[in-house]
Image (spheres, rainbow, N blue to C red):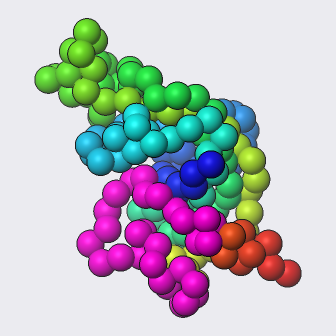
């Protein structure tokens, strides 16, 4: 099993949106490294830290799991979509996505609190210049985050 931190802007897809829907496609990824994580490394059942980004208080807002293999992201072919890519063709799609399933809505583990936790210092999301929307999380980091999310 692998673990991932996946960023979403809450006005586009929040943890509450995922909770209501149960399952959502993780569309709109337009970075090759993040796409390759989905295509090459994600597996059914992998754990996901659902991270709210580009908002007043960014941080981990809940837990999810990968519930599909990677498949073509239809938004790349839709001229009305902000994720439209005119260079991508249906016969050779450039962009993929996975589906994620809601597991738990938690109290927010803010970016500030994450930065203050020595056991999380190595997380990719905390590294200077890290802008990837999907990053791997080590088993030790996963356990440390769970401990903080479920602390009384």
Q: Residue furthest left?
A: 87
Q: Residue 6 appears at what percent x and percent y?
A: 50, 53
Decide if residue 59 is on the left or right side of residue 108.
Answer: left
Q: Residue 70 appears at what percent x and percent y?
A: 46, 29
Q: Residue 94 appears at what percent x and percent y?
A: 25, 27
Decide if residue 14 is on the left or right side of residue 124.
Answer: right
Q: Residue furthest right?
A: 152
Residue at image coords 54%, 65% = 138
Q: Say which of 9 and 101 sits in front.
A: 101
Is residue 51 visible in this depiction of the protein? yes
Decide if residue 152 is on the left or right side of residue 43.
Answer: right
Q: Say which of 64 and 108 sits in front.
A: 64
Residue at image coords 42%, 69% = 125
Q: Residue 110 appears at what percent x and percent y?
A: 57, 76
Q: Split into 4 quadrants, where in the image is the C terminus?
A: bottom right
Q: On the image, which quarter does residue 20 sit in?
A: top right
Q: On the image, which quarter does residue 38 sit in?
A: top left
Q: Residue 69, relative to residue 4: is it above or below?
A: above
Residue at image coords 44%, 23% = 71
Residue at image coords 30%, 78% = 128
Is residue 56 visible in this depiction of the protein? no
How many dots with numbers? 0
Q: Residue 62, relative to residue 70: is it above or below?
A: below
Whether residue 70 is in magenta: the answer is no
Identify the magenta region: 115-142
Whether residue 141 is in magenta: the answer is yes
Q: On the image, which quarter does residue 150 sit in?
A: bottom right
Q: Residue 37, relative to residue 92: is it above or below?
A: below
């Amino acid at each position: 099993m692998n673990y991932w931190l996946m960023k979403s802007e809450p006005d586009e897809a929040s943890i509450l949106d995922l909770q209501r829907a149960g399952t959502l496609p993780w569309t709109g990824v337009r970075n090759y490294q993040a796409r390759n994580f989905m295509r090459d490394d994600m597996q059914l059942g992998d754990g996901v830290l659902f991270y709210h980004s580009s908002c007043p208080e960014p941080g981990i807002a809940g837990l999810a799991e990968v519930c599909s293999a990677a498949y073509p992201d239809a938004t790349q072919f839709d001229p009305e979509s902000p994720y439209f890519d005119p260079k991508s063709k249906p016969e050779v799609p450039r962009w993929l996505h996975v589906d994620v399933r809601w597991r738990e809505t938690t109290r927010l583990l803010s970016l500030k609190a994450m930065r203050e936790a020595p056991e999380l210092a190595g997380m990719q999301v905390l590294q200077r210049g890290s802008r990837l929307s999907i990053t791997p999380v080590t088993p030790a980091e996963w356990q440390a985050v769970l401990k903080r999310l479920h602390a009384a």
